[in-house]
Image (cartoon, rainbow, N blue to C red):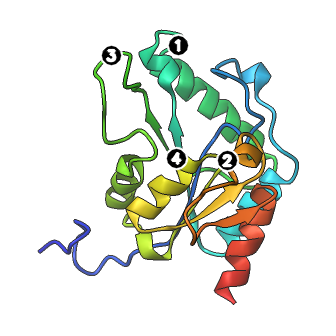
Amino acid sequence: MKTPQNRPEGIPLKPAIFLDRDGTINVEKDYLIDPADLVLFPGVGEALRRGRQAGYLLIVVTNQSGVARGYFTTSEVERLHDHLQGELLAYGVQIDAFYLCPHHPQHGAGPCDCRKGSPGMLLQAARDHHIDLAASWMIGDKRSDVEAGIKAGCRSILVRTGYGEQEGQGVPPATLIADSLAGAVDLILQQQR
């Protein structure tokens, strides 16, 4: 018998921290694809390690419309994610899974349910990894990140890195705001106490 989140009975649900990539984990660079151009924000490795130690899965959910536009392939995105894993390994932490939306409404197949602010990537990750969405968080630098988290049933935090400073006005009322990913993880851990 399956439960409502399509998990086998008896398997406990786990909380997760869903993470936008560009502008949240690493410095925003339009259509980042070259691993040599990946620059982590200060404190990211340590913050992710603290989140993991607190019992959260770490799941990256990233819009990558450069695939639909023909700028790069999903294989090249995966190569960049492998490089990111190598960078984080130096801090004793790894991302549990990467989900990407390769679509763009004006390029290719049109609208999809995975491009943030839709919750498709988060919902798929919840099915794949038995995630308790109500106990989970979405961290990102854009309103679309926050909206995806809320639509999936998570709490959301807008970070002021990347586009976050511009996006800070008009986010949904329950959204928390932090200066950085490290500050967002601090907020999450404070909520646990």
Residue that badge 4 annotates: 144
Name the amino acid type tagged 4. Ser
Q: Is residue 34 visible?
A: yes
Q: Which mark is residue 130?
A: none
Residue 122 higher or lower than 153, as above or below = above
Mark before the other along the chain sequence, 3 or 4: 3
The quadrant in which residue 68 appears is: top left
Mark before the other along the chain sequence, 1 or 2: 1
Name the amino acid type tagged 3. Gly
Q: Nearer the viewer, residue 161 or 125?
A: 161
Q: Which mark is residue 167?
A: 2
Marks 1 & 2, CB-CB < 8 Å contact: no
Q: Which mark is residue 72?
A: 1
Marks 3 & 4, CB-CB < 8 Å contact: no
Whole-Å distance between the Cαs marked 1 and 2? 27 Å
Mark before the other along the chain sequence, 2 or 3: 3
Whole-Å distance between the Cαs marked 3 and 4? 20 Å
- Single out the mark in the foreground, 2 or 3: 2
Residue 40 higher or lower than 52, as above or below = above
**How many numbered tags mark residues here?**
4
Residue that badge 3 annotates: 108
Q: Residue at x 48, y 59 (%)?
A: 149
Helix, strand or loop at disc 1? loop
